[in-house]
Amino acid sequence: MNPEQDPSALAAAQPSAPTQSAGIPAKARKAWRPWATALAYAGVAALAYRSIDHASFLAGISRLRISHVFLLVGVALLHIAGRAVRFDRLMRRAGANESYHFAAGIRIFLVGLSASAVTPGRAGDLIKAQLVRPYGVALNRGVGLVLVERVLDLLVICTSIVVSGAVLSRRASSDTWRAVALAFLLGLIVLVVVLAVPAIRTVLLRLAARIIKLFVRSLDEQRILQHLNEIFVVWDDVFHSFPRLLAQLAGSMCAWCIEFMKLWLVLGLLGASIDPVLALFVYPISIVAGILTLLPISEAVVGVTGAMLLHALGGVDTSVAAIAIVVDRATSVLTPLGLWALFALTGSGASPVAAVEPSSTSQRP
């Protein structure tokens, strides 16, 4: 039979339905993601506004000048820049191809930072593992990159809680948080040490591969182990070099201390004076609370926890504490969203949505 008349050949020549529809979800996601994020933040703001004294809130907000707003946004930009530079360095360590550039890294980082604020446990940050695929970084290796970022951040955050808690005068209400932070920090150190020792990690990964094989029998155990090992490529590059680890921790500490002290700066602009060390204690605790929460909007948990601790430990008036938290979180959340919108309007960097359709270079394990 003539191939041109063969129905099976004609069917094979036609593009499949899934291929045609595959682009639709990507375009849809590109349209609704920013709106969904903005709607979630608007909902949190509306709930917070209903629970405070409107007159006191508006009076406190009126103390802030335009110059103050620019100052706070500048501080937020310094924090974002520090973490974006770290992400860029980790991307290059992960083996990004020649198509990758710094602007693309910033855009991917901003997407992950914005998504993490509206997901339980800030899990939205894992979207970066998918967005790095068009630049030759496989999904497994991207997960490892995000894991390194998260561990570095948690080490700095818990260290800040423990050290600042030791410096502050002993208070019954802060003893529990110091104990939790110390236990969490020690647990992280043990985790880093265990995963940094190849012999121990190999045993754990083989056990994990066998467990996965029990649930998904169609998968090959060696293939599972290969994918699991790929996650730790960036991890080994950072944690097996002591000078490199110190450099990463120092950079992370500087970036987060800038963010922590922004809360102290906001309170000062509102006329409330607190010990700067208290900001290094309260802010990271509120972030840990946001990470541990199961609620869909982690920023709400961060804000409520911060306001309660400022009032309980620093004697800050509840209205002033609420205003400070709202202003601080607004600058921290809206600044990356604004930068993301700027990148989208100017077309700088690669489109993050392009990662939804993996390229040929992203197919390698």
Image (cartoon, rainbow, N blue to C red):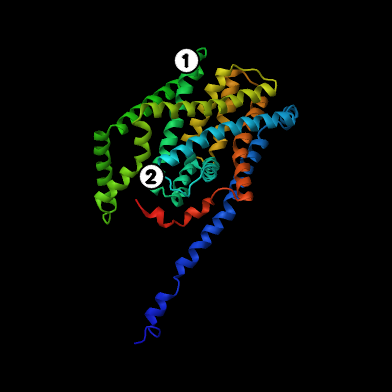
Q: Give the residue type that dot 1 points to.
A: Ala
Task: Determine whether the residue tagged by mark 1 lies in a helix, strand or loop.
Answer: helix
10 Å crowding of disc 1: few (<14), some (14-19), many (20+): few
Who's the residue at 44% across and 70% down the image? 16
Residue 89 screen position, x and y as percent: 46, 37
Residue 46 screen position, x and y as percent: 66, 40
* Residue 61 visible, this orientation: no
Residue 256 screen position, x and y as percent: 52, 28
Q: Which residue appears farthest toward the front when viewing the image?
A: 98
Q: Which of pointers 2 and 1 indicates the residue nearer the eye?
A: 2
N-term-proximal mark, 2 vs 1: 2
Q: Residue 166 has which mark?
A: 1
Which residue occupies the foreground of this view, 246 or 171?
Answer: 246
Who's the residue at 53% across and 29% down the image? 255
Which residue occupies the foreground of this view, 338 or 154?
Answer: 338
Q: Which residue appears farthest toward the top when viewing the image?
A: 169
The residue labelled by disc 2 is: 141
Which residue occupies the foreground of this view, 286 or 89?
Answer: 89
- Asked if residue 266 lies left or right of residue 1, the reply is right
